[in-house]
Amino acid sequence: MPKVKSVIVIDYYEGIQGMLASRGDFPYDDFLANPRMRTQTEIVWATDVFSSRPSLLCDIKGELKDRYSYALKERINAIEAIIESLKTEDGGVALSELLSKAISYIDERSVYCGDGNIVVVNWGLIPRRPDLDSGSIYRSGKFVGNWGNFQPVPQVLEKPNIKEEPRGNEPEVNVEPVISVPPVSAPSPVTEEIPVVEHEIPVESAPKETVQPVSPQIVTPPPIVQADKVEIPKPTEKKEEEKKENPEKPEASIQDKENYDNKDTGKNAKNTKKEDEYNWKSFFSGLWQGLKFFFRKIWWVLLLLLLLFAVLFFCKGCQGPISQINPFYNPLPENPRILPIESGAVGMSADGMTQIATDRLNIMLEKENDNTMLEWAKAFKKEYSGENYEIFYYNEEFYNLQIKVPSAEREQIKKEIKQKLSGFSFDVFDETVFNTEAVSFNDPELSNEAHAWYLNAIEAIDAWNLTLGDPDVIVAVVDNGFDTTHPEFQGKIIRPFNVLTQNANLRPILTKDGEDAHGTHVAATAVGNCNNGQGLMGIAPKCKLMPVQVGNDNPEGCMSNQAIIEGVLYAINQGADVVNVSLGMYTSDTVKEMSEGQQLNYISSSMKQEELMWAKIFEKAKQRNCIIVLAAGNDNVISGIDPKKRSNESIRVSAVNTEQTKAKFSNYGVYPNLNRIYSTISAPGVEIFSAAPHGKYTNMQGTSMAAPIVTGAVALMKSIDRNITLEQAVKFMQETGKNVGSSIGPMLNLKKTVMRANG
């Protein structure tokens, strides 16, 4: 292969095209125009990609020019990536130099655009004069031929007529070539019209003798495989050649040389920066080709892995050996639910002090990171893998879980689980069972006048002259069940919820004594309708009711601690202003026989995990300015025996009788010297007449009936001022209440309390 000189790079067109076509990373086969004929003064270019006359890139304006400029840059980048790749291949250095010369001087005046295609003419022509750029050395080229009716003719190269001029003047060249593409076996619409591009190149000095035209037979360039013989002239050789061709051209001044050198240095720096940039493109281009090859070879393996991952993902809740290898395994239930109290699953705690659910345990975790609960659950299932050991409930806000275990193994698991799961910090405790804080009472001798005794005792009628309540104030009642169709609730129920069924289906529960009226009675006492021609009216008859059911059918009417917690959290999160909880823990005879001092010591040392859990709930309620009212209990013990009634961040309500003294069954607890208060306020809790299921009414008694009276009072205060806090509400009630003994809080006077709140 001869040395690659300036303009004869185009003689290697077929070799360059073959090399580009053989590489899968260059899809632009028609980018370089075909140099069909070359003389000393002009080159005729041809292409077959345009169906209509194209335009020069320099003549295109606006967004279209931007798109074609981007496409041009894309093609040049692809070739530069190939050049860099060739430099690393055996025998590829010479080929990279040849390809580099082919694209060294391309500008907008040699780029034709049309039909979404780009064709470059004047490629591979290296300027001989360094003071001229790549465009100024060429005359304006143009495609020739009739685009509409151009018909291909046999390839014939006629001799050009060249008119000779004296030396020193630019020769007048007249070349009229007629060219066409080689015939093909089956013509297509694309190859029937062959556009030809003609560009002219000025000659700096014309020879005296007549220039002989190129032979009609185009010489096939040397095979591209001989590119390793390509030699690039050294700068000194190129300078001597220029001197021979231009003997009269003076030497450039030293200053001109310095200016040119500086200019050339800037260009070299720019080219070096481009090479660094496109080395990465070359790398990623080669990487993409490798990835495509890789995927073609092992697509079936990838498909198999995808199917395997899909199976593992959909089996993330599956138990058994597969769970040990499943990266998606998650033993936490998708829909955590509270376990209902089941018949035969209620018993006494190991110390005989409390009534508990024997088929479950509560876990309170110490959060170390966001995955602590999931990791604990996995560790639990690893140690207890059978179907009899399940996680049914969890709460990420308080980081507690409830696990179902066989009743016969509960005590053993409770003792050993912390050792088996020693990598976690947590407490384990029993699920306490609660009952309604009421004593059923029916007396056929009661007269209607007696039904309203408690309303008169707290001066409710005078309070109603100030307010009957605001419909925007929401009173939540968390109880065992409700008859929401009762006339006392017509038009006032908002966002009802059943914790166990996770829906709005509420009803009175069934016990061994039949249908239970507790929740219906409590709710009507707090907010029962007025002026409906039936029964009595609630303390805050114009406020809204949010009934939250936490009980299910069981002989004893028991409810779990976790269900009650979930119900209170629901009420807080749903915007309740005040929450009534008239539910109490079972108290054993052992506790009832303790002295007050022994009870205080028991309170200080027992059930601390549940106490902590309720403290968190009260704190959350305080943040939402929601006040929680609790029935003190009916066992005539210190109400703090129940861990949820130990915090001053709630209102604990004791009961008084018709003589306005402590009811004999009511729990108590006022110890100011010890800074321990377990009875905040008291209210009537005997012979309370209110609603029962199926539109009926009945008398009930207990602190469960006293609590909703105080709940109604808080609702009336919030109807006057929604921003009243727990501390303010307690202060208003205690300062205006009636002293009914040292062991319980003062008895509510509704009239004075509302007046105080009204300012």
Image: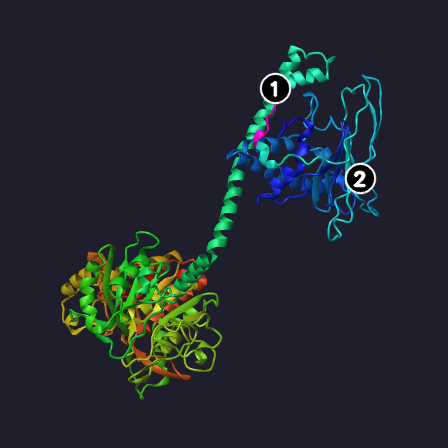
Residue 594: x percent and y percent?
14, 68
Q: Quadrant of residue 353?
A: bottom left
- Return the residue nearer the eye: 492 or 548: 548
In this rendering, is residue 220 above or below 259?
below
- Return the residue nearer the eye: 522 or 34: 34
Can residue 455 be seen from the camera position used here?
Answer: yes
Q: Amino acid at mark 2?
A: Val
Residue 474: x percent and y percent?
44, 67
Magenta highlight range: 228-235
- Return the residue nearer the eye: 376 or 90: 90
* SS category of the residue bearing label 1: helix
- Return the residue nearer the eye: 58 or 638: 58
Picture colour scheme:
rainbow
In this rendering, is residue 78 above or below 600?
above
Q: Is residue 1 left or right of residue 738?
A: right
Residue 72: x percent and y percent?
66, 39
* SS category of the residue bearing label 2: loop
Residue to which mark 2 is pinned: 156
Residue in the image at 76% along x and 52% along y: 189
Q: Nearer the viewer, mark 2 or mark 1?
A: 2
Q: How many marks?
A: 2
Q: Is residue 456 magenta?
A: no
User: Mark 1 Cα within 10 Å, few/some/many (few <14, many 20+)?
Assistant: few
Residue to which mark 1 is pinned: 235
- Dividing the image into 4 quarters, which one contains the N terminus? top right
Q: Earlier in the sequence, mark 2 or mark 1?
A: 2
Q: Amino acid at mark 1?
A: Pro
